[in-house]
Amino acid sequence: MKGKLSFCIVDDDDIYQFTIKKTIKSLNLAANVLAFYDGEEALNFMIENLNNNKELPDIILLDINMPIMDGFQFMEEYIKIMPKLGKKITIYMVSSSVDPTDIERAKKISEISDYIIKPIEPHQLEFIVERIQKG
């Protein structure tokens, strides 16, 4: 099953996007890696593909601080469209913020599986994939 999942990176940092994509591919953890620079781009993609499970990601790595629509705003809108999605998507908030307010706010959103402080390590990505594959 390894390598069959689809990741979605929602982060406005070019270097982070590049390195995380390279890491996911080098570990053979995903068949596909989508990337968006803000929450609005990602949300629009989700809405356009509501009935197209093949295009929708299995895992979203979501940053907090982004222009246009931040991670928390994305989650507010995502929760509204979630019942219309044809598959379960696992969301991890991945941020450089160590602000306890951000961490607590993320933990209060039940649709967020966990809060990971950047940089995300390869073993963390492997653990995420293993967890999802086990169900």
Image: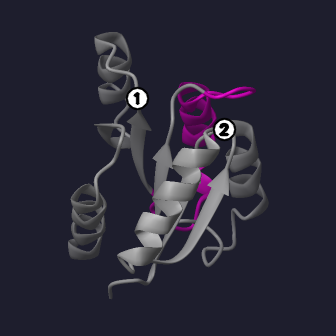
Residue 40 position by quadrant: top right
The type of colouring in the image is one colour
Q: Does residue 82 appear to the left or right of 30 in the view shown?
A: right
Residue 76 in the magenta stretch? The answer is: yes
- Quadrant location, the N terminus: bottom left
Who's the residue at 30% across and 68% down the image?
Answer: 129
Place of residue 55 in the rendered image (x, y in percent of width and height, measured from the top left): 65, 73
Res 10 visible: no
Q: Which mark is residue 96?
A: 1
Q: Looking at the picture, tell me which residue is in the foreground, 56 or 117.
A: 117
Who's the residue at 29% across and 18% down the image?
Answer: 104
Q: CA distance from mark 2 to mark 1?
A: 17 Å
The segment highlighted magenta reads: 66-89
Amino acid of disc 1 = Ser
Residue 85 in the magenta stretch? The answer is: yes
Q: Does residue 21 appear to the left or right of 110 in the view shown?
A: right
Residue 45 position by quadrant: bottom right
* Residue at the farthest bottom position: 1
Q: Is residue 31 above or below residue 80?
A: below
Disc 2 designates what residue?
A: 39
In the rendered structure, are the residues bearing label 2 and label 1 in contact, judged by CB atoms less than 8 Å apart?
Answer: no
Place of residue 35 in the rendered image (x, y in percent of width and height, measured from the top left): 64, 56
Q: Is residue 83 above or below residue 28?
A: above
Amino acid of disc 2 = Gly
Helix, strand or loop under label 2? helix
- Quadrant location, the C terminus: bottom left
Residue 74 position by quadrant: top right
